[in-house]
Image (cartoon, helix red, strand yellow):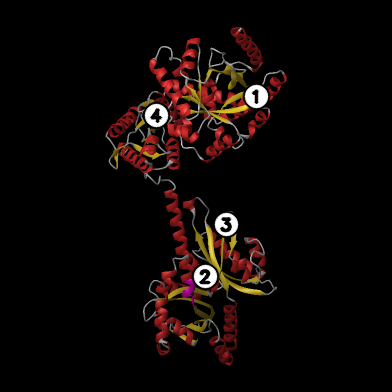
């Protein structure tokens, strides 16, 4: 006996080592045939564990769990008190819901179930509370209680039979009596009771109150109060409490008994007592698992609001903060409700490309530290994009204060920043916007700050701009224009215009460049510089590209029927369109009609890292005989390596170089170098923007393969193309005569 108690005293600590794992909890519950359930009183959502079904003989999922299904399966006599106990817990009148009732099994029989549960708050997650609990088969206990009641009625003649039953029952039975004089006795007690309560039989025989000696001091007042209540109201006694063991540790006990008033004024209880230590440990394990899950969830929510690299709040956190600020912070002492600073690093991509991404990360962390220092007492700084940051100032600060914060950051940026001994050369542009009266939404505030930042970029970078009325008007105009562009696309107002390209040596027509024009009902005929920037912002540039191809498909058939067979057609392709999978298929019809198709890409694509769809489309173009032209070559910083990677068919020399070719020797030298590089790489050249015969002669002498510009023709409509071709052929014939 002592050896077994010693092992039992060590079990809680051993089990405690495993209680933190969800797998242990699930396995323990399944092994004990304990069924779990939970219900949301507000929504009615209900969940039963697999054991809930199988313990009653049903297939798992045999019916959808709900409180109504639960009541329907319950014995009609047990429903009122069960519903009352549940409602009392919902109303907050009890800390724990407990109920015993009968449920109908799959074979039609009834089985006694003991259930308990408690509220689990989820307000922190913004969810209604749950009542979570467990239930187990207590048929054996009910049988024992019935036998105990019968034994009490039959008195001594049934005592031996009751003892045999008790000794073979999972629970230990007792008759506990408080006499009229207040003394405590045990007329009947099984050996299991003494063992569970850690007392000796002779001690109990001398003084029945010894039974309370080892009850945990924290639980004893509740046990005594429950006995007093049961004796006073003759209500059933149900109590769970701890018993201190001699070898250390505790054992959890559950006692259930029914009281009866004796003729002499005393009260006797017939009841059962059993060890529920494992049940409590399972409950504790469930609670620990639930607490761990809630803690992990809270940690994940916190991490979701922080930028992993810099430790600054991220875009989601910043957006939430600024919305709350604007809703809770009215105008203070004549200052705006919110002042926003947008920050974008200049030449950051160059740091990544030349020194590597680790250097780029170091720059981002360095800038983040500067922002923290500059806003320590003045506001909140966040990383809201790859190399973008945002700052919202605290209440009561003005645009002038924002300029001061920017000044501190600029001062820090002027100090050289080294990564592994190498200088990282970068700067930052800043845009400031403010809510003048608190009525501007957070989205508009961000847009206004972005507009100021964009203007800072346009005006040379590494500077500060403040959003003003002129910028506000331009945004309003852009939004109006965006709506008109979308409507124009639906009405098919975007039409192709054409500008010829000729061989510099022979003057033969080599192709036509397709140029988008907007025949707007509101604005008349507009060139791309009037609509394309807004179209790119609202992501419809690819739709305009599609419209050009569709329009040309219809025109080519008409031209060919009239004897004009264009050798090549060049289409400008936006970055958005370049990522779409049908870009090659869209021009199949033109190729089948015998037209060579060329796609013009901006020089900037040579400076960018192409993503997978772009690389795939570039390969598809080459595989399908579509030529690639680099437009406006010489306007950016394209590298020879970029040309080798893209492998274009043609370089189109930028207009800004060709315009000065007559007067400027440097322009001639530069164009000559471009032509030389192109020839070395097997690439043709087209000189754009040619307006005079002198320019054409020089460009031809420099080795340009083709010429395009107003000298030949300004961009013309489809109706004018045939007339121009006829006139141009006649002019060539006249000159050669």
- The magenta region covers 275-280
Q: Which mark is residue 552?
A: 1
Task: Report the residue marked by disc 2.
Answer: 27
6 or 328: which is nearer to us? 6
Which sits earlier in the primary sequence, circle 4 or circle 3?
A: 3
Asked whether residue 369 appears in the rendered view, the answer is yes
Tell me, yes or no, whether the two marked residues, 4 and 3, touch with CB atoms within 8 Å.
no
Residue 464 place in picture, x, y as percent: 36, 27
- Please rate how many residues cluster around mark 1, counting C-alpha atoms within 10 Å: few if below 14, some from 14 to 19, many from 20: many
Residue that carries the numbered disc 4 in the rendered image: 431
Q: CA distance from mark 4 to mark 2?
A: 59 Å
Horizontal and vertical percent for residue 435?
A: 42, 29
Q: Which residue is mark 3?
A: 41
Q: In front here: 270 or 513? A: 513
Pointer 4 or 2: first along the chain: 2
Q: Nearer the viewer, mark 4 or mark 3?
A: 4
- Tell me what residue is drawn at x 62 percent, y 70 percent: 54
First-in-chain label (2 vs 3): 2
Q: Position of residue 365 (x, y in %)?
A: 34, 42
In space, the residues marked 4 and 1 are separated at their CA atoms by 43 Å
> Where is residue 262 drawn, in percent x and y?
53, 83
């Amino acid at each position: 006996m002592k050896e077994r108690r010693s092992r039992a005293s060590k079990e809680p600590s051993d089990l405690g080592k495993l209680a933190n794992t969800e797998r242990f909890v699930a396995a323990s519950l399944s092994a004990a045939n304990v069924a779990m359930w939970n219900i949301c009183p507000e929504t009615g959502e209900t969940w039963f564990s697999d054991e809930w079904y199988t313990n009653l003989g049903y297939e798992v999922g045999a019916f959808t769990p709900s409180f109504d299904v639960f009541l329907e399966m319950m014995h009609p006599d047990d429903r009122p008190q069960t519903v009352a106990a549940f409602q009392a817990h919902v109303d907050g009148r009890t800390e724990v819901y407990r109920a015993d009732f009968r449920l109908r099994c799959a074979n039609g029989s009834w089985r006694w179930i003991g259930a308990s549960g408690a509220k689990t708050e989820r307000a922190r997650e913004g969810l209604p509370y749950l009542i979570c609990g467990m239930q187990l088969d207590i048929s054996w206990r009910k049988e024992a209680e019935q036998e105990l009641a019968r034994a009490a009625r039959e008195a001594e003649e049934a005592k031996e039979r009751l003892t045999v039953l008790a000794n073979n029952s999972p629970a230990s039975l007792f008759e506990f009596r408080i006499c009229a004089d207040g003394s405590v006795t045990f007329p009947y007690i099984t050996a299991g009771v003494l063992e569970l309560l850690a007392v000796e039989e002779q001690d109990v025989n001398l003084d029945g109150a010894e039974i309370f000696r080892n009850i945990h001091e924290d639980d004893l007042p509740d046990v005594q109060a429950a006995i007093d209540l049961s004796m006073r109201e003759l209500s059933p006694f149900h109590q769970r409490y701890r018993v201190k063991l001699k070898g250390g540790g505790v054992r959890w006990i559950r006692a259930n008994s029914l009281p009866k008033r004796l003729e002499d004024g005393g009260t006797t209880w017939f009841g059962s007592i059993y060890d529920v230590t494992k049940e409590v440990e399972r409950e504790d394990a469930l609670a620990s698992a639930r607490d761990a899950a809630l803690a992990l969830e809270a940690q994940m929510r916190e991490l979701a609001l922080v930028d992993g690299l810099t430790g600054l709040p991220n875009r989601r956190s910043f957006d939430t903060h600024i919305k709350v600020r604007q809703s809770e912070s009215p105008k203070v002492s004549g200052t705006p409700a919110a002042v926003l600073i947008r920050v974008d690093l200049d030449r950051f991509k160059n740091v990544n490309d030349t020194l590597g991404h680790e250097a780029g990360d170091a720059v981002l962390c360095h800038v983040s530290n500067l922002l923290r220092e500059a806003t320590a007492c003045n506001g909140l700084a966040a990383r809201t994009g790859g190399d973008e940051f945002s700052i919202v100032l605290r209440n009561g600060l003005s645009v002038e204060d924002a300029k001061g914060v920017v000044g501190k950051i600029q001062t820090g940026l002027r100090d050289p920043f080294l990564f592994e001994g190498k200088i990282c050369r970068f700067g930052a542009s800043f845009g400031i916007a403010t809510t003048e009266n608190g009525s501007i939404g957070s989205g508009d505030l961000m847009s206004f700050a972005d507009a100021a930042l964009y203007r800072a970029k346009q005006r040379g970078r590494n500077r500060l701009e403040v959003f003003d009325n002129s910028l506000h008007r331009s945004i309003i105009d852009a939004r109006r224009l965006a709506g008109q562009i979308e409507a124009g696309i639906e009405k098919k107002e975007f039409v192709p215009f054409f500008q010829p390209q000729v061989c510099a040596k022979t003057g033969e027509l080599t192709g036509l460049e397709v140029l988008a024009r907007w025949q707007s009902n509101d604005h008349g005929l507009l060139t791309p510089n009037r609509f394309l920037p807004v179209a790119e912002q609202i992501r419809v540039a690819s739709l305009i590209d599609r419209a050009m191809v569709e329009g040309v498909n219809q025109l080519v058939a008409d031209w060919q029927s009239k004897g004009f067979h264009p050798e090549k057609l060049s289409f400008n392709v936006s970055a958005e369109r370049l990522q779409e999978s049908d870009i090659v298929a869209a021009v199949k019809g033109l190729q089948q009609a015998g037209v060579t198709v060329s796609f013009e890409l901006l020089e900037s694509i040579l400076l960018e890292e192409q993503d997978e769809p772009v690389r795939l489309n570039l390969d598809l173009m080459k595989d399908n005989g579509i030529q690639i032209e680099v437009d406006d070559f010489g306007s950016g910083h394209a590298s020879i390596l970029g040309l080798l990677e893209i492998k274009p068919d043609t370089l189109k020399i930028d207009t800004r170089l060709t315009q000065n070719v007559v007067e400027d020797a440097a322009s001639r030298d530069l164009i000559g170098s471009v032509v030389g590089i192109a020839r070395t790489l097997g690439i043709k050249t087209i000189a754009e923007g040619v307006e005079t015969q002198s320019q054409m002669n020089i460009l031809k002498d420099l080795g340009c393969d083709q010429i395009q510009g107003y000298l030949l023709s300004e961009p013309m409509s489809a109706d004018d193309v045939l007339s121009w071709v006829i006139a141009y052929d006649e002019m060539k014939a006249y000159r050669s005569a």
